């Protein structure tokens, strides 16, 4: 249909409205420095430089709205919500009419490899949703009262971002009453028939979350520069 043919834009939504409570650095982690640049700037640059990404939307909190608008004049900047899911919903509302695919990325994952974007977009031709994931290497257990249950690593994945969807699929999931910490979780609950798939993630695409994580990435960048 002509209407669907017009939907040809790929939009990156970078969620940067969190407070970084687990890192506890005062300033939210996406605005701390890595190397000599703001953490948020890395993913903005990666998506902005990718030939298949048409527009970058940054979702941020009220305190940082003005400075983010000023520092990233080529991006749309919108106000987030009190949960990651609400922030993603705000980003979805800001997508242009012609959006076909949305790629939702955590600002707290600055070192996203370029080729992960390519492999996600390629898979989206066949699937409704795609995200990078890595297989756990450590033993995994669930704690049930005072008993431990060993989980089979073969069935487990560590899910990263960008989490990429046909925009209509993600918007529909957002109209459901379900809540989840990420889009793959939300879509699989809200739309059990959705076709979801993973591509190979990368260790370096780690999310800065706790004390020490930023140092790991700083050490990596320094080693790259040598
Ligand atoms: N995020 C967001 N809006 C929220 C909460 C989180 O846009 N209300 C974003 C964060 O800015 C981050 C990403 O979602 O880029 C992943 O979330 P997380 O690592 O949990 O970041 P924070 O919520 O900031 O950290 P914490 O949970 O430790 O408070
Ligand atoms: Mg959080």
Image (cartoon, grey):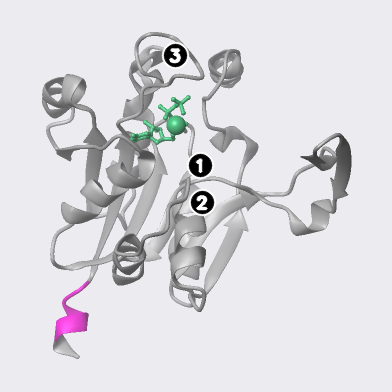
Name the image quarter holding residue 6: bottom left
Tell me the residue that label 2 is attached to.
116
Name the image quarter holding residue 225: top right
Q: Is residue 75 visible?
A: no
Q: Is residue 18 left or right of residue 220?
A: left
Compared to residue 202, the image places residue 193 above or below, namely below
Mark 2 sits near ligand 1, with its Cβ under 8 Å away: no
Give the quadrant of the N terminus. Answer: bottom left
Q: Is residue 105 visible?
A: yes
Compared to residue 15, the image places residue 31 above or below, namely above
x 59%, y 59%: residue:
199
Q: CA distance from mark 3 to mark 2?
A: 22 Å
Q: Which mark is residue 113?
A: 1
The secondary structure that dominates the magenta segment is: helix
Q: CA distance from mark 2 to mark 1?
A: 6 Å
Q: Secondary structure at mark 2?
A: helix
Give the quadrant of the C terminus. Answer: top right
Q: Which residues are magenta?
A: 3-7
Sequence-wise, the earlier of marks 1 and 3 is 3
x 34%, y 12%: residue:
27
* Nearer to the camera, 204 or 137: 137
* Residue 187 picture location, percent across and down: 45, 64
* Nearer to the camera, 49 or 105: 105
Mark 1 sits near ligand 1, with its Cβ under 8 Å away: no
């Amino acid at each position: 249909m002509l209407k669907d043919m017009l939907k040809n834009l790929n939009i990156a939504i970078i969620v940067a409205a969190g407070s970084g409570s687990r890192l506890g650095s005062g300033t939210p982690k996406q605005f701390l420095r890595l190397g000599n640049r703001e953490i948020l700037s890395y993913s903005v640059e990666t998506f902005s430089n990718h030939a298949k990404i048409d527009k970058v939307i940054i979702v941020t909190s009220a305190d940082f709205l003005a400075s983010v608008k000023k520092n990233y004049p080529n991006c749309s900047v919108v106000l987030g919500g009190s949960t990651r899911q609400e922030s993603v919903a705000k980003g979805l509302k800001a997508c242009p009419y012609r959006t076909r695919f949305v790629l939702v990325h955590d600002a707290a994952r600055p070192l996203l490899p370029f080729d992960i974007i390519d492999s996600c977009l390629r898979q989206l031709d066949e699937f409704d949703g795609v995200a990078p994931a890595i297989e756990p290497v450590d033993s995994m257990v669930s704690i049930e009262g005072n008993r431990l249950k060993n989980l089979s690593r073969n069935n487990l994945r560590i899910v990263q971002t960008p989490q990429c969807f046909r925009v209509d699929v993600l918007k529909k999931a957002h109209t459901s009453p379900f809540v989840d910490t990420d889009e793959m979780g939300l879509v699989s609950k809200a739309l059990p028939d959705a076709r979801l798939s993973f591509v190979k993630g990368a260790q370096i695409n780690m999310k800065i979350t706790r004390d020490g994580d930023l140092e790991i990435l700083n050490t990596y960048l320094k080693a790259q520069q040598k």
